Image (spheres, grey):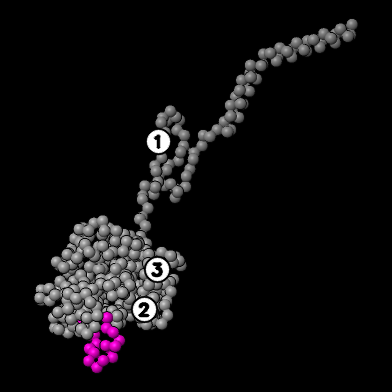
Amino acid sequence: MPHLTIRRQARLLFAGAFCLLFFSWPALAAEGEAGSDQDAGAVSLESEVMLPPELWPDAAPLARDESTAGAEPQAAPVPSATLALPPPLDPPPLTEVTVMLDWYLSPQHAMLLIAQARELFKAQGLAVELLSPADPTIPLKLLVAEEVDLALTRQPILHLQAHQGEPLTRVGTLIETPLNAVIVTGSVAETDDVALLAGRDYGFSTREGETIVAERLIPQSLRQTDGFKAPVNVHFDAAAAVVRGDANVIADGYFASLPQQLAPEGIESHVIRFEEIDIPRHDGVIVVANSQTLGRHGATWARFMSAVEQASHWMIENPEASWTLVAEQHPILDNAINEANWESLLRRLSLSPAAVNTRRYQAFETYLQKRGLIEEALPVSRLAVDPHTLGAEP
């Protein structure tokens, strides 16, 4: 029957196709595995890595070597630039500061000498030069002319100069009490009666000695007499003037040294402190700046006084070592008189040299006005400042 023949033919074709697929399957599977390996190789990282020679000249191409596949990798050379230390930075330049002393070098300048010897100024970024004047009247003149940065003087001088319009302002105190006093010699050496000193022969070395002290001791009525002998300027050589007989009362002698200088000459002397004749206590040695430069250099003066303060504290804590250092650095000061007075000087040092004793400056202005030496008192801010309160330099 025809339909049976067609069915049989279909069965035979199906059986043939099944046999063909069964026997060819292993070959197809192997071919599929090979194809997958080829696909995996398409993303293989087996390639040479090349670096620009100018970036890493010692580096060789990192090519895969089948012969060293299991070997430990070798470290690449380190660039030599990473081994070199950077060059040291140059320290900032030091600010130069010139300081004119009030007269020749003496122990009263010890705070500055110690600060210089122990490099305390340098630690504050300052290169300080200390200058001695040929004439004690020069320092403030040079300061006003801005020929020097700072100068030393005494508080009474500051008051008198400021009232003459000089642009001077105190920025620090080295010695807190006067180093001068009235030195009485000769037959009146033991008297405590100031009235008996009026008719004596006076000598002075400083402007305050003539204008303030002698004015206090010599009555105006005596000054108007025909026989009045005006005080003479002994030019900072009071001992020689007394020995010559030019004066038997020194209005402003250095009480720490003048009596010792006169004793070998057989001359007795007596010291009368300024407070005993109603002259207010005042700063003995101060640092002054030009008022017109305070705005520009306030921060520098603050650093200067910080170094001075460190020197002051070290001297108080090391009195013997401080004297030894001063004597070694400045042999001209190494003598018996200076050594004997060293302890006394240390007690007069300012421990806060930048701070202003406002009451003290007000009191001295009041005294000068009361004595008729000035017409109107100046504000303390015109006379003295703490440089730490000034603005920073631009």
Between 49 and 139, the residue placed more toward the observer is 139
Mark 1 residue type: Gln
Disc 1 target residue? 74
Write down the region rendered in magenta. 217-234
- Based on the displayed image, in which of its 4 quarters is residue 254 positioned? bottom left
Q: Secondary structure at mark 3?
A: helix
The residue under the point 84% across, 9% down is 7
Mark 2 sits on what residue?
A: 368
Residue depicted at x 16% and y 80%: 242
Disc 2/disc 3 C-alpha distance (Å): 16 Å
Q: Quadrant of residue 186?
A: bottom left
Let me know if residue 350 is in the magenta part: no
The residue where tag 3 is placed is 358
- Looking at the image, which residue is at 42% across and 76% down? 378
Left or right of 114, for residue 32: right
Image location of residue 224, percent across then percent down:
28, 91
Q: Amino acid at mark 3?
A: Thr
- Name the secondary structure under disc 1: loop
Q: What is the number of the mark on residue 95?
A: none
Q: Earlier in the sequence, mark 1 or mark 3?
A: 1
